[in-house]
């Protein structure tokens, strides 16, 4: 049985899938905050691990040969946000989790803008498969790479 989220992503573009992964990071970081507020360390660690797993997946799928400098910028962002989330978890800090959410949201919103451009998705449907979400478009990823985030 296909759940709602899986059904909603059927036929989505590569960029839409990347946006959905960013949404997942944000959702798990909010779950980590909720766990911090309840004082449940195991739940915090599970939520943090799931967010970090998505970041690792996104970083591993970057295509440096296609994306050039924007791909490098995204790689640096993923490394920085990974470190931020780890620090937030270790310090059990709601404020640090919220800062990480703001950073991820900024880049996610930039990807949403890219998704509005019909020429931005460089992956044809025959090239897209479940294991390779999105190569970085050289022109459109500048938006994501230049959005305001701090590590």
Image (spheres, grey):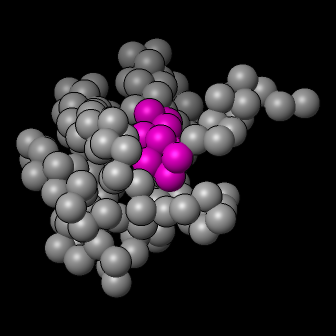
Q: Is 129 displayed left or right of 83 in the figure?
A: right
- Examine the rendered structure and indicate whether residue 132 appears above or below residue 98: below
Question: Which residue, as the protein is rendered here, is positioned at the far top?
Answer: 38
Q: Write down the quadrant of residue 100 in the picture.
A: top left
Residue located 24% across and 55% down the image = 140
Q: Is residue 86 left or right of residue 70?
A: right
Residue drawn at point x = 58 percent, y = 41 percent: 12
Extreme residue toward the bottom, this view:
65
Q: Is residue 151 above or below residue 29?
A: below
Q: Does any portion of residue 4 appear in the rendered image?
A: yes
88 sits left or right of 28 in the view: left
Viewer-closest of 150 and 109: 109
Please tell me whether residue 32 belongs to the stretch shown in magenta: no
Rendering quarter of residue 147: top left
Q: Quadrant of the N terminus?
A: top right
Rendering coords of residue 17 (x, y %): 52, 45
**Residue range corresponding to the magenta coloring:** 13-24
Residue 96 sits above or below residue 121 on the image? above
Residue 93 versus residue 112: which sits nearer the camera? 112
Q: Look at 83% across and 31% down and name the residue there.
A: 2
Q: Can residue 93 be seen at all in this image of the molecule? A: no
Closer to the camera in the image, 139 or 61: 139
Q: Could you say where residue 138 lies in the image, as x and y percent from the top left?
A: 24, 67
Image location (x, y in percent) of residue 55: 42, 55
């Amino acid at each position: 049985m296909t759940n709602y989220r899986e059904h909603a992503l059927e036929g989505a573009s590569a960029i839409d899938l990347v946006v959905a992964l960013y949404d997942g990071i944000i959702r798990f970081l909010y779950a980590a905050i909720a766990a911090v507020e309840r004082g449940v360390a195991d739940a915090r660690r599970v939520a943090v691990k799931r967010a970090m797993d998505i970041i690792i997946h996104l970083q591993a799928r970057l295509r440096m040969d296609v994306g050039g400098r924007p791909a490098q910028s995204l790689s640096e962002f993923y490394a920085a946000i990974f470190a931020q989330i780890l620090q937030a978890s270790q310090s059990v800090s709601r404020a640090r989790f919220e800062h990480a959410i703001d950073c991820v949201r900024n880049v996610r919103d930039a990807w949403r803008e890219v998704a509005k451009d019909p020429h931005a998705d460089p992956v044809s449907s025959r090239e897209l498969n479940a294991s390779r979400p999105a190569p970085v478009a050289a022109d459109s990823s500048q938006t994501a790479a230049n959005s305001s985030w701090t590590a």
